Image (tube, rainbow, N blue to C red):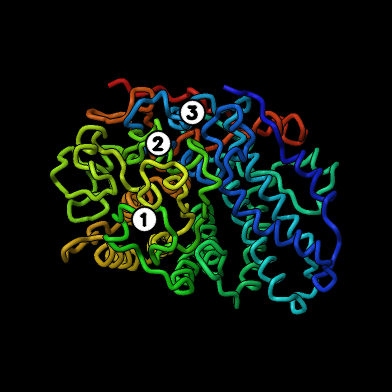
Amino acid sequence: MKNILKISAAALGLLLSSCIKDATPTEIAPEDQATLETMVRGIPAALVQAGSAGYANDGQAWDFALPAIHLATESMTGDLVVTGNIGYDWFQQFGTNDALGADYAVGALTWHNYYTWIMTANNVISLIDETNLAALGATERSYLGFAYTYRAMFYLDLVRLYEFKENTVTEGDNVLGLGVPIVLPETSEAEAKNNPRATVDDIYDTVIFPDLKKAETLLENFSAPDKYTISAALVYGLKARAYLERGTAKNDPEAYKSAAEYARKAITASGCTPLTQEQWEDPVNGFNNAGSNNAWIWGLALPSESVANLLCFTAHMSCENDWSAYHAGRGINRNLYNSIDMRDFRRHSWLDPDRSSYAYKSSRPDSKEYFAESLADYASIKFRPAQGAYKDFKAGGAADHCCMRVEEMYFIEAEATAQAGDIAGGIRLLNEFMTSHRMMNGAVYDCSARSTLKSFVNELMLQKRIEFWGEGIVMFDMKRLDMSSKRGFVGTNAPASYRLNVEGRAPYWNFVIGRNEVQNNTAIVGKNNPDPSGKVEPWKG
């Protein structure tokens, strides 16, 4: 395992002021306008770039940007299990809590990528003079709105990953309330080399919420042409996520009310509707095509010319393809699967031990035999090879990657409503969503008996874990809510080394800053999160 990280936020800070020309929108030369457009278009391309952390050439098949980050956090929840040969699990460190400290390369997946993306967003912001927003042309206005949205999104992810939250395994009293260093366009070389971890409150108050407020203003009249383009609805959705975090951290009813408000605004502004059963189970377009449904608020496109065999999400998460040694490798925790109502069509995303229980759909002509003989019980068929191309990795791997769909907003609205004091309102919202959008043949979902806040939030999170399994959403909620995770139990379908049980939040949900950053940024010394590696013994029965 590589143990040297190749980049740091401190090093990135050196780049911020050296490659940007000062120019107002009306004075941008054609070549600078082209540079601006290239930068803006380059951000979503970078978010799906194979080798983005600099380790693909070293054979590290976890190195494929944001989709890999989502897979890493999913591997940490306990809900995702490896059902095939664990020797092919390139995310084993995340799934087994092994080698996650400062000296290991996997830290670059989050740290290197997010700060590189922040640098690009900063560069776009630096190119546009925003002293007079009214004078901005429509193009520059939208580009600036995109850049602020991206930067807020990146810092929101970073602070949720790196904030040390108390747990029963590791201690971090000296880093409580700390997030990550803030790097802005004006950050100097000297400041970058001595840039402390900002407090979580400061990151929300000086970057995340101000950036989202600016983006909301800049994009209020912008109409996104497709699901790959940032929209006002995405901004509202990010504000809903951020206010939900703040509500829990501060036990603040007003923040929860704002989370519910912005979740509803995202639903309304997007015009999106939840996935139907047909769309959910589509063997050709299931969870791989932004244009095949009306549920996605924002997603990323991976063109076929950019697909690398193992360096893409489908290679690791689709069990139907023939072009990956990983094809039989991902499934759902048996206990979570057994908690899904028999009348809920989401149950069909994983193979029941009784294969005859449902007529599973697939693009494979041999699917009946393949599902019965080649795949383990509880294996996932949620994420389909693009275009149904299960033999051709260039076509099958070129899947769109969902980053926000409207269903998340329904869950945020329901939880935030209850957390703000209206438990009955939250119950009503969850009942309406589940009955209208997830139950089959007229079945009614009813969680009215979950009349206490704790029991309702537990039920909502059960449904949210089922809904967003594999999508990189749920670990943040589990960390926020101090939830337990459990892969070790009688009858578990998880391999022995993955059977980690933690009461309350897991220590490995507090990501560790890499050694390279600590060496280049003196203000980080003594302020890193404790290494959780190996501190949870696998359950042995």
Dot 2 or dot 1: first in sequence order is 1
Residue 506 drawn at (x, y percent): 45, 35
Q: Amino acid at mark 3?
A: Gln
Q: Secondary structure at mark 3?
A: helix
- Numbered circle sitting on residue 323: 2
Does 398 sit above or below residue 232? above
- Do the CB atoms of the residues marked 3 and 1 lie less than 8 Å apart? no
Dot 3 or dot 2: first in sequence order is 3
- Numbered circle sitting on residue 285: 1
Q: Amino acid at mark 2?
A: Trp
Residues 162 and 220: in front is: 220
Q: Amino acid at mark 1?
A: Asn
Residue 301 drawn at (x, y percent): 52, 54
Q: CA distance from mark 2 to mark 1?
A: 18 Å
Q: Secondary structure at mark 2?
A: loop
Q: Secondary structure at mark 1?
A: loop
